[in-house]
Image: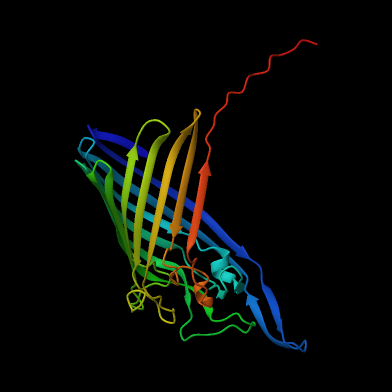
Amino acid sequence: MIERELAPGWLANGGIRVDYAENDTRFFRQWVWDSNENIVDSLIAPSTAQSYFNWSASVGSSLVLRKNAWFLKLNLGKSFRVPYPAETVSNGIHHGTFRHEVGTPGLESEHGYQLDLSTDWTVGGFSGSFATYFNYFDNYIYLGPTFPARFSPLPEAGQIFQYRQDDAVYTGLELQWQWKVLPFLSLKQSSDFVQSYNLNTRLALPFTPQPTLKSSLLYEVSGKGWLSEFYAELGHQYIFAAEGRLRVDRSERPTPAYQLWEASLGATLNWQGQQLILSIQGQNLLNSRYLNHLSRYRLINVPEQGRNIVFSVKIPFSARLKKNEAVDP
């Protein structure tokens, strides 16, 4: 890795890496029995002996356009990923995700080509950041539902998901900003958007995150005496639907849009020289029933957490430990 300062406030860096890996597994068969102890099927994990030789590299630059006010970063990179044994030979229920997952022997290394651009700025009481990225993947390895849909021979295992690889594009952006409307009042907002695209199927990749928009209004004051800090915040989240050919893969279940409200209060008290930090937070205040598109519980229609109230009390303290002096015997 090399880093150089090309000019005051302008840094450049670059590096290259070479890797060699092997993936060796043994043959395994698991028989499937019925309730009468008769063999009705079997699950096979084949033997593999694969080797991979890959390289990766990156080059980047950061530039201060205006001191303490405007920064710009740009990175170009080439990456790779060797398939894990679970992606090549697995065959059975993944009990943490409630699905039957099957590997694909003979997967090749995944290669990615990345472009990342980000900027941060501060203008008076307004500050923000913006980041965007574009990734092209050659032989992208991913887990997706089988098409046409196949179902597991195991009881209550549901649809089979299989590891496969295709050429794909993965791109997106993130935007955050904060405006200090008054010395004690701030408005914040953040959004993120991810778009995946399978160049072979011309559909989205499975498990693509839903676009989100988060907003909050924050009131905070500082004082002296027994109340040194106080804040109150109201927040709202809108999560867009994951549906349609550009948001979900074939045989992948769509997820509807939802919105959440939250609020919090907090204070820092001074009591006889000791700080006491109190807070109360309400999450999903309207007790909305919703599903997260990336949740493993979505496949069995288990919703996310409902209304939740959190109380917090923190008592910070510090102490100095004295070093014991050595005692001669």
Coloring scheme used: rainbow
Instruction: Give the camera-side residue of 208 and 279.
Output: 279
Residue at (50%, 54%) from the top-left corner? Answer: 310
Residue at (58%, 23%) from the top-left corner? Answer: 320
Residue at (30%, 59%) from the top-left corner? Answer: 191
User: Is 13 placed left or right of 50 in the picture?
Assistant: left
Residue 29 in the image, given as x and y percentages of width and height: 69, 76
Residue 60 in the image, given as x and y percentages of width and height: 30, 45
Instruction: Give the camera-side residue of 318 and 299.
Output: 318
Instruction: Give the camera-side residue of 6 and 68.
Output: 68
Residue at (27%, 34%) from the top-left corner? Answer: 5
Quarter of the rendering containing residue 221: top left
Q: How many marks?
A: 0
Please say if 177 is above or below 192.
Answer: above
Residue 177 in the image, given as x and y percentages of width and height: 26, 51
Q: Quadrant of the C terminus?
A: top right
**Which residue in the rendered view is the most extreme toward the right?**
329
Residue 117 showing in the rendered view: no
Q: Quadrant of the N terminus?
A: top left
User: Is 135 placed left or right of 67 in the picture?
Assistant: right
User: Is 171 placed left or right of 305 in the picture?
Assistant: left
Residue 157 in the image, given as x and y percentages of width and height: 60, 79
Residue 209 showing in the rendered view: yes
